[in-house]
Amino acid sequence: MAKRRRHTPDQIIRKLAEGNKLLAGGTELDEVCRHLQIAESAWHRWVAQYGGMNASDAKRLKELEGENTRLKKLLAEAELDKSVLKEIGGGKLLTPNRRRSAVSMLRDRFGVSERRACKVVGQHRSTQRLEAPPPADDDAELRGWLRAFSKQRPRWGWRRAAKQLRRDGRKINNKRVQRLWREEGLRVPYKRRKKRMVGIGSAVGALCPIAPNTLWAMDFQFDVAVDGHTLNLLNVVDEYTRECPAIVVDRSIDADQVVATLDRLAVVRGFPAFVRFDNGPEFVAHAVADWCRFNGVDSIFIDPGSPWRNAWIESFNSRLRDEFLNGWIFDSLLEAQVIIEDWRVDYNINRPHSAHGELTPAEFAQAWITRHQPALA
């Protein structure tokens, strides 16, 4: 069987030109193919690929194909290098021994050449082929001492270990202790501080309400009973009228109780347009966020550590502390609930506010309703 011949683009174009001359002279295609010593399928494939080209066009196409192959190879190598770098991980490999280990690992895992692995890691090939220097005679004993020291003093690092070695009479520098400490994989574990949750509410800026029931402010306050148990107070204030719709008193108050309080007030007063909180865990909880979303109420969270951005509720807390809590000692939770509720009612009905022209919160709210009754009707 004759060996199959591979044609170059120049040869293909010359045969196409010869074949077209024969076809123009009336020769059948099968005769042309026999004359050119090719199959008819090859003729049709050549016409589809090289039809209308001359020799220079074919040469340029060949160059483009070679360039495309080279670019594909470069892209594949770049992707391989990227995978190799991901495998090594972040940070620099600062010592020859670490780079030597990285090169060996890459060759085993990716099957790359030593030249390629050294280039990616940044290791000279002559350095890679050098044998690692033998450890000092006392390195094994010193490594064991460092491991024992780390177990005995888990919160002390290599600096204190070096100081202790020198206190024991050894002449040793910090660099050696640090190197052996790291090679043994010793480290002082640190406690990562848990990131505090911060509520995400509506960005309204310095919102100033212009009608009752527009904005409710909520905050917690604490007191202590005679028996030493803590009393938690959840205070709610209407920022426009300065009314206090509710003060919830309990041993502890969670997000579900906050939602229950909002539901109870909404039945009597209707839903507010906004509710202002700080970033306490009870307020940033999903239960409160869901209540606001389900009832069309926008939540406003003050900046962390900025109580002055919730000024009206802070002012109310100071009045409650100064005028009542500082002068009363509660014997039980039930007594605190009853007496604080009596104070809340008295505050709304009988305590005048200079900002309201010496009207009480209840009087100011009623005056607003009377003044805007035609519009409300």
Image (cartoon, grey):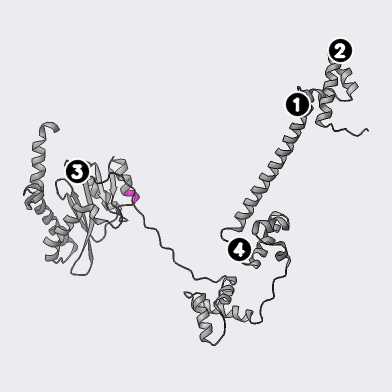
Magenta region, main secondary structure: loop
Mark 4 vs 1: CB contact within 8 A: no
Residue 205 position by quadrant:
top left
Q: What residue lies at 22% left-to-right and 50% top-to-bottom?
A: 217
Residue 307 position by quadrant:
bottom left
**Horizontal and vertical percent position of residue 305:** 29, 58
Determine whether, in the image, residue 136 is placed left or right of residue 198.
right
Q: What residue lies at 14% left-to-right and 46% top-to-bottom?
A: 241
- Residue position marked by numbered label 3 in the rendering: 209
Q: Quadrant of the C terminus?
A: top left
Disc 2 to disc 3, C-alpha distance: 97 Å
Disc 1 to disc 3, C-alpha distance: 77 Å
Residue depth check, mark 2 versus mark 1: number of the one nearer the observer: 2
Of 4 and 234, which appears nearest the observer? 4
For marks 1 and 3, the one nearer the N-term is 1
- Residue position marked by numbered label 4 in the rendering: 93
| First to last magenta residue range | 283-287
User: Looking at the image, can residue 324 be seen?
Assistant: no
Q: Secondary structure at mark 3?
A: loop
Mark 3 vs 4: CB contact within 8 A: no
- Amino acid type at mark 1: Gln
Disc 3 to disc 4, C-alpha distance: 60 Å
Q: Which label was assigned to residue 49?
A: 1
- Residue position marked by numbered label 2 in the rendering: 25
